[in-house]
Amino acid sequence: MRSYASTHQAIAPALYDKWLIFAVFCIVAIGLLMMTSASIVVSDKQMHQPFYFLFKQLVFLTLGVLLGSVVMQVDTSYWEKLSGYLLLGAILMLALVLVPGIGRSVNGSARWIGYGPLGFQASELTKFMVVVYMSGYLVRRNTEIQQELTGFLKPMIILVIIAVLLLREPDFGATVVVTATSLGLMFLAGMRLRHFVLLFSLVLGALAIIAVSAPYRLARLTSFLNPWERPFDTGYQLTQSLIAFGRGGWLGVGLGQSIQKMFYLPEAHTDFLFAVIAEELGFIGMLIIMSLFLLFVTRLFIIGRQAQRLDRHFAGFLAYGFGLWMAIQFTVSIGVNSGLLPTKGLTLPLMSYGGSSVLVNCIVIAVLLRIDHENRLVGLGIK
């Protein structure tokens, strides 16, 4: 009869983070369900097919899983070698978006590169490329970041170029996410507090000036402060979202029973998906979604910390960067939907409809699983 010790030793250690996979699976599954519920009316009206957006999302998700399975085979060190080229690729993409005939304008914003029915949102891939580049830079210039003012001025020049290109689209939401993620990474890399406060103040001031420099941005800011003052004009989208929150109560009106998604709330299946979740699933449903995202982000930071302890600093910064990106975008999306932040076009990661975001998010998850897998191999002395 085998002893307990021999049985215990025979069990192979897990090579991937089970809690991360659990969180991602639950978020994606609930996202598909709620995105379908939020889009079914508009899909039936516009496409004469109630599940049009579901089918497209499933196609993108399938492509994302296939792409992610390929990305998982790539060693993390290769991303560090490619970081400079990825940055150049991001700048080139953002520039091409602004070229007539190459870039495509949707709802007044030139954010897509594509031809005919095929298109890709350049800002989504830019977020990924900037995190990879910043992770590599922080490893190469770690001492300079911690001691010298020039250590964070150099990447800020690059961020300014990217921000200018993003604002030309315009995409203020992506600008905020990219900038905030980069600042967070530099802080985690050990930047001196006085340098960080100075840089944060300058960036905050610049974003404030940019926000009020364009009339439509200023209108969004003022409507956010008091959307009920002009509920049928600049405050329309937010007031409809707040009505959805109010109708939801504790337990919601029931899956599929939302009234706001019936052409009252614009972009219900993309930027304002969380409002439909609040209406149909109520406070309890919102709490479950937020708990899953908290688990997701927490696991990313744990993976990053494990990589740092194993002296895999690039992999650690990469996991931190992805964690910051997802946390910032999720927080801003909820803040916008609930009226705590100005209205900006940011989707719920892994949940909202959108081919570009689904594909990029699948790449991010694949890289994170690879980092965690390598951490475990190093910890076991295999790698």
Image (tube, helix red, strand yellow):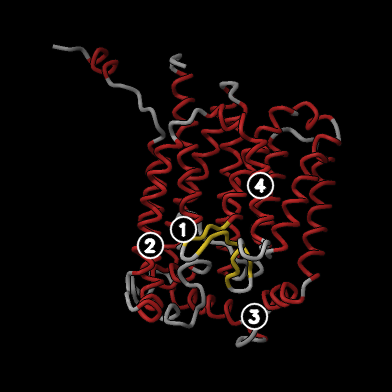
Q: Is residue 361 left or right of residue 332?
A: left
Provide the residue designation for mark 1: 355
The image shows residue 141 at horizontal and vertical percentages of 75, 29
Q: Label 3, label 4: how many angstroms apart (C-alpha)? A: 29 Å
Identify the secondary structure beneath mark 1: helix
Which one is in front, 347 or 200?
347
Circle nearer the N terminus (1, 3): 3
Mark 2 or mark 3: whose residue is earlier in sequence: 2
Residue holding disc 2: 56
Residue type at mark 4 is Thr
Circles 2, 1 touching at the beta carbon (< 8 Å): yes
- Is 206 on the left or on the right of 383, as rendered? right
Q: CA distance from mark 4 to mark 2?
A: 30 Å
Query: Are the two marked residues, 2 and 3, in contact with CB atoms closer than 8 angstroms?
Result: no
- Chain-order first, disc 2 or disc 1: 2
Relative to 379, 184 lies left or right: right
Within-10-Å neighbours for mark 3: few <14, some 14–19, many 20+: many
Whether pointer 3 and pointer 4 mark residues with C-beta atoms closer than 8 Å, the reply is: no
The residue wearing badge 3 is: 227
